[in-house]
Structure formats: structure tokens, C-alpha cells
Image: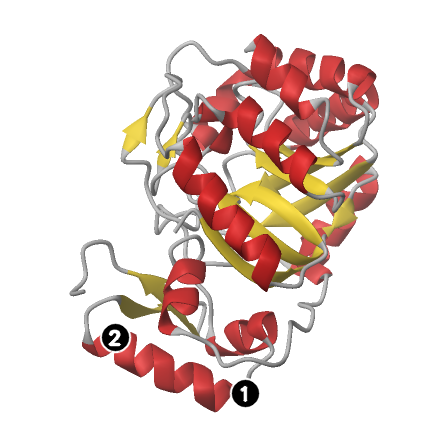
């Protein structure tokens, strides 16, 4: 599904999602990724999803759905889609609603990607490490990528973009949370000057089972060192209410991140009992499966389940 939602975003409000790449086509293979391990590690841009299919689904959603913002995001790195700049341009021509892009920052060196990002309202970019060794440990990037290049490109984007740059840092215990990592990130934030900086840690089942998060108290303390907002203490918001929830919507949400029943209930604004019924049906068809993480049951989409 190239268009999904809308769902409640803790940062953006009621968000209509646009997914431009198949599951886990990405330029990095982050140890903490909630979608799972990268299946195609690449920096090669291609039309992974056709522009016509994306725009047809989006135009239908614009007619039928209510939302606050359009977010180009998904289950891989969206800027890898060769038609990404055209998608931005087309969305701009179709609606005055704000446009956001979630990106891992690795394709900013591509001029047409950079220029397209300069035209959106919110760029939510990742920078998990400012030291090369830690960058390679936590993000496991495709060959040719470096932390230094990401930092320089984010600085350039901040200086030219028309909208706001929100930077997200995710810390993994023992991987990119050493004192020297925190100091390097602090200096990076001073140089980039993002409009907002947000600190997060592992709170969902990660790609690597050994990837562990920090405690809320640790995140709060480090956020003060970095002058960053501690994302992990942000409450999950209330979603929409109204029309019944479809299994396709639930499966689409879970294909991008595992979630517990309570989160799905709040994201879509429907009772937990309705969510549980849909999950039971999807599980019986092999479309989703439960995963216990830190004592909480999450549900995750299963690639290749029964139709």
C-alpha cells in the first residue's frame, strides 16, 4: 500500500503516510530498526514504486480522508525512490496541507533529493552518531557513506531549506552512548542548529535482539547534555474516531513498526476489543504474529502471509 492511514503521530498530529519503497529497501541496516533487518542495502536510486500508482492512491485519499499533514515515510528510505522529487512537487500542487519527510539523511548528497527536501515543511532526519566508528556500529551503512558527510549535508540543508529541520538521535546501550559519542553529538547539534532535536532509544522489538535501550532517567539526563527533547517520555496521542477499522489498515501500520493493542487502539481511535478481533483474524491467516519485548506483547506484520 503506497498510501496508509491517517494515524496519530506523536510529533505531527493526524498523518497520512506515503510509502515510496518496498519493505526494508534502505541505505542503512540499523541494529535498532523496528521494521527489521534490511533486505536490500543500497544507495542506488530506482523507481521502487511507480509514480502513477502512488499518485492515484494519494489523490483518492485526499478526496476521502481527513488529516493534518502528509508524511513521506515508510518501511525503508523514501529518498531512494528515483521519483521522490516529483512526488514532492505533485503533492505541493495538490494540497496546501503541510508536507513532512522522514529520512535517514544518507541521500542528501544527491542534488535533486537535496533540492526537493528544501521545499518541504518538515524534514525529520536521523543522526545517531557523529563518530565514524559508532556510526558504522549502530547504522551499518551501505559502502561509501560516512558520518562526516551526513553532518556536512545536514548543515547545508539547515541553511537553505524553507521549512524546519527536526533531528532525531536514537541511542543504543553500549553502541553509541559512550561519553565521547555524546560529546561528538553535542558538537554536531551546535553546528547543524536544527529547529528541534529529539532523543530516543530502543522501545520496540529491534532488528537485532541484543540491541538494548536506555532507561527513561538516562535519556532525560543525556537530553539535557545535548539540549534535545527526550522523545521516550512523550505520551502517545489519541487518534481519529469514526468509521470502522479495516484489517488492511492494521496490517499496513504493522508492516512499518510493531505495536501493542493499546497503541493501535489510540492511533486509529477505536476500542481495544475491535483491534484484538482484527489481530486475531490476521494472525489466523499468518499475516501478523505476536512478539514479546520487555514484558509487553507487540504485533508485527509477517512478509508473505496468506492472502
**In front of the other: 214 or 196:** 196
Residue 38, picture quadrant: top left
Residue drawn at point x = 44 percent, y = 74 percent: 295
Q: What is the CA distance from the residue labelled 1 to the residue labelled 2?
A: 19 Å
Crowding at dot 2, Cα within 10 Å, few <14 / some 14-19 / many 20+, comes out as some
Position of 213 relative to 55 (above/below)? below
Position of 234 relative to 191 (above/below)? below
User: Left of 291 or right of it: where is 253?
Assistant: right
Position of 196 relative to 35 (above/below)? above
Crowding at dot 1, Cα within 10 Å, few <14 / some 14-19 / many 20+, comes out as some
Residue 154, picture quadrant: top right
Q: Secondary structure at mark 1?
A: loop
Identify the residue position indicated by label 2 in the image. Answer: 283
- Relative image position of residue 99 (x, y in whole percent): 69, 40
- Relative image position of residue 255 (x, y in whole percent): 38, 55
- Relative image position of residue 84 (x, y in whole percent): 52, 26
User: Left of 203 or right of it: where is 52?
Assistant: left
**In front of the other: 99 or 64:** 64
User: Left of 104 or right of it: where is 24?
Assistant: left
Position of 248 relative to 52 (above/below)? below
Identify the residue position indicated by label 1 in the image. Answer: 271
User: Left of 298 or right of it: where is 124?
Assistant: right
Tell me, for residue 86, which label it has, or none.
none
Q: Quadrant of the C terminus?
A: bottom left
Q: Does any portion of residue 293 appear in the rendered image?
A: no
**In front of the other: 139 or 278:** 278
Q: Secondary structure at mark 2?
A: helix
Amino acid at each position: 500500500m503506497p498510501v496508509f492511514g491517517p494515524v496519530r503521530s506523536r510529533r505531527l498530529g493526524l498523518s497520512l503516510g506515503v510509502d515510496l519503497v518496498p519493505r526494508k529497501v534502505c541505505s542503512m541496516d540499523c541494529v535498532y530498526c523496528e521494521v527489521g533487518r534490511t533486505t536490500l542495502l543500497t544507495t542506488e536510486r530506482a523507481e521502487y514504486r511507480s509514480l502513477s500508482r502512488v499518485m492515484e492512491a494519494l489523490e483518492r485519499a485526499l478526496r476521502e480522508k481527513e488529516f493534518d499533514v502528509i508524511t513521506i515515510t515508510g518501511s525503508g528510505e523514501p529518498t531512494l525512490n528515483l521519483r521522490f522529487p516529483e512526488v514532492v512537487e505533485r503533492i505541493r500542487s495538490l494540497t496546501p496541507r503541510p508536507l513532512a519527510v522522514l529520512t535517514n539523511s544518507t541521500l542528501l548528497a544527491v542534488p535533486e533529493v537535496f533540492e526537493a527536501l528544501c521545499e518541504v515543511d518538515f524534514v525529520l532526519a536521523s543522526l545517531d552518531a557523529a563518530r565514524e566508528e559508532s556510526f558504522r556500529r549502530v547504522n551499518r551503512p551501505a559502502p561509501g557513506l560516512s558520518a562526516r558527510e551526513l553532518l556536512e549535508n545536514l548543515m547545508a540543508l539547515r541553511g537553505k531549506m524553507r521549512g524546519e529541520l527536526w533531528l532525531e538521535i536514537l541511542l543504543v546501550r553500549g553502541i553509541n552512548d559512550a561519553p565521547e559519542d555524546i560529546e561528538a553529538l553535542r558538537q554536531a547539534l551546535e553546528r547543524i542548529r536544527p529547529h528541534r532535536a529529539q532523543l530516543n532509544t530502543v522501545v520496540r522489538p529491534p532488528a537485532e535482539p541484543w540491541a538494548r535501550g536506555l532507561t527513561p532517567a538516562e535519556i532525560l539526563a543525556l537530553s539535557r547534555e545535548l539540549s534535545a527533547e527526550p522523545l521516550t517520555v512523550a505520551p502517545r496521542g489519541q487518534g481519529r474516531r469514526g468509521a470502522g477499522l479495516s484489517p488492511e489498515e492494521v496490517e499496513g501500520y504493522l508492516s512499518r513498526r510493531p505495536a501493542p493493542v493499546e497503541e493501535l487502539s489510540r492511533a486509529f481511535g477505536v476500542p481495544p476489543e475491535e483491534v484484538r478481533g482484527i489481530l486475531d483474524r490476521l494472525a489466523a491467516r499468518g499475516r501478523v504474529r505476536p512478539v514479546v519485548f520487555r514484558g509487553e506483547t507487540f504485533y508485527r506484520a509477517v512478509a508473505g502471509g496468506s492472502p
